[in-house]
Amino acid sequence: MKLNRTALAVAAALAFPATASATNGYFAHGIGVRSQAVAGVAVALPQDGLAAAVNPAGTALVGDRLDVGVNWFKPARGAEISGNTFGADGKYSGDGTSNYFIPEIGYVRQIAPAVAFGFAAYGNGGMSSDYSRNPFGAFGSTGDAGVDLAHLFLTPSLAWKPNERHALGAAVTLAYHRFEAKGLGAFDNAFVSQHPGSVTNRGHDSSVGWGVKLGWIGQITPTLSLGASWSSRVETGDFDRYKGLFAEGGGFDIPASYGVGAAWKVTPALTLATDWQRIEYGDVKSVGNSLQKLFAGNRLGSSDGAGFGWRDISVWKFGVVYEYDPKLTLRVGYSHAQQPIPDDQTFFNILAPGVVRDHWSIGASWKPNAGGEWSVSYTHAPKTTLHGNNSIPAAFGGGEANIHLQEDILGLAYTWKL
């Protein structure tokens, strides 16, 4: 019990928000080191105490455990402007801050023969950019430019097995997120913003909210499992300090998502798994409204204000798990996502260049003893450049903004079997 108390203390210490990663749009490509090693596959393949982050039914299938991990995230992002009559042409690096550490914690305990309780704390994405040379300087902005958006989710879950072949789960998602913008003085005026003075350089603001998750996993045959999950929109409080930047006076809800998955045990040692995920970015006005709304009279911060123009996306994930021997398990995965940012929306998205679409992942778990296990994962998202097409409005001198992003993520976790 001393080990368990120590582990829980470490977990509690890690459960503080950190600037989180952006992969599929601004959602993390996977939750939990094991899931990340198979490119985020998890709907029908629960592997650790963070399973409820994707599908709360998985809480019933992973056994009593505590998983504590951390991910090192290194993005490389930037922009290039050309053909601009205001003199903004040039290349801009958004890598003023380029190393982030993201903790994760998952705990599961069987509380009745057919019922399990789980608790997970994790970052489900975010977005950060830091330009020491301001890409909006030619339009009147001064100082460094960038944004810092981070999410922390706390997800208690309950899962029930009505029989040996099926599991049902439900969870509440408690969300804390924070945001900061700087260097956007060009947009901080009454012509562009509904609330000038609440657009930029206001320090970090934060808000909280909640949503629900539902899920099912069924063993259809002795070798085939299917799963389905749904996460509601998380309605959060407004970012009051930035009510002049985001639509609806600082609104920035976390969009709904849902997915289905399958896991096929080809042999006792080899499992093939796949997920399909849908993320509804376009339903959140501050994210989904286009910048063109600004020129139709919908200023930044207004009820239908201009935003980043993101679309809903689908993500396809594929993973392989191979149990080499009782102590060593190997994993590999690949995912592909639709592009959330239209090519005519790249100008404002210099701040949030979430354009990567492909992720290649690899990882392993090693059991040094019966009570514990180490897991590691590495993910690479190759550099993706989105070339602007009629992307800079004439009011800002026209031309094109091209944005790019590349990512590397290294995860390490330890599991205590309780």
Image: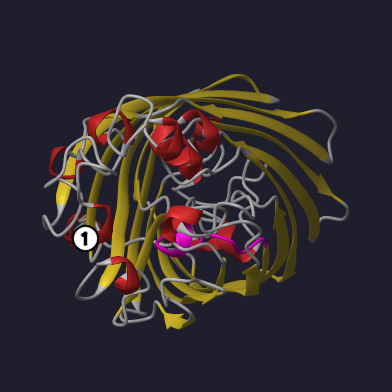
Question: Against 286, is 22 above or below?
Answer: below
Tell me, yes or no, if residue 327 can be seen here. Answer: no
In this rendering, would 364 be left or right of 235?
right
Asked which quadrant contains residue 387, the reply is: bottom right
Disc 1: which residue: 185
In this view of the protein, which residue sits in the foreground, 21 or 116? Answer: 21
In this rendering, would 289 be left or right of 339?
left
Residue 200, position as x, y percentages in the image:
19, 55
In this view of the protein, which residue sits in the foreground, 105 or 20? Answer: 20
Residue at point 59% right, 51% down?
341
* Label 1 Cα crowd, 10 Å radius (few <14 / some 14-19 / many 20+): many
Residue at point 29% right, 82% down?
132
Asked if the stretch drawn in magenta spans residue 350, the answer is yes
In this rendering, would 216 be left or right of 367?
right
Residue 181, position as x, y percentages in the image:
24, 58
Asked which quadrant contains residue 343, the reply is: bottom right
In this view of the protein, which residue sits in the foreground, 3 or 287? Answer: 287
Asked which quadrant contains residue 234, the reply is: top left
Question: Against 357, is 63 above or below?
Answer: above
Q: Amino acid at mark 1?
A: Gly
Residue 314, position as x, y percentages in the image:
69, 42
The secondary element bearing badge 1 is classed as helix
Question: Against 85, is 149 above or below?
Answer: above
Per the picture, the main secondary structure of the magenta-coloured stretch is loop
Residue 339, position as x, y percentages in the image:
66, 52
Residue at point 71% right, 25% down?
165
Q: Which residues are magenta?
A: 349-357
Asked if the stretch drawn in magenta spans residue 298, the answer is no
Question: Against 101, is 300 above or below?
Answer: above
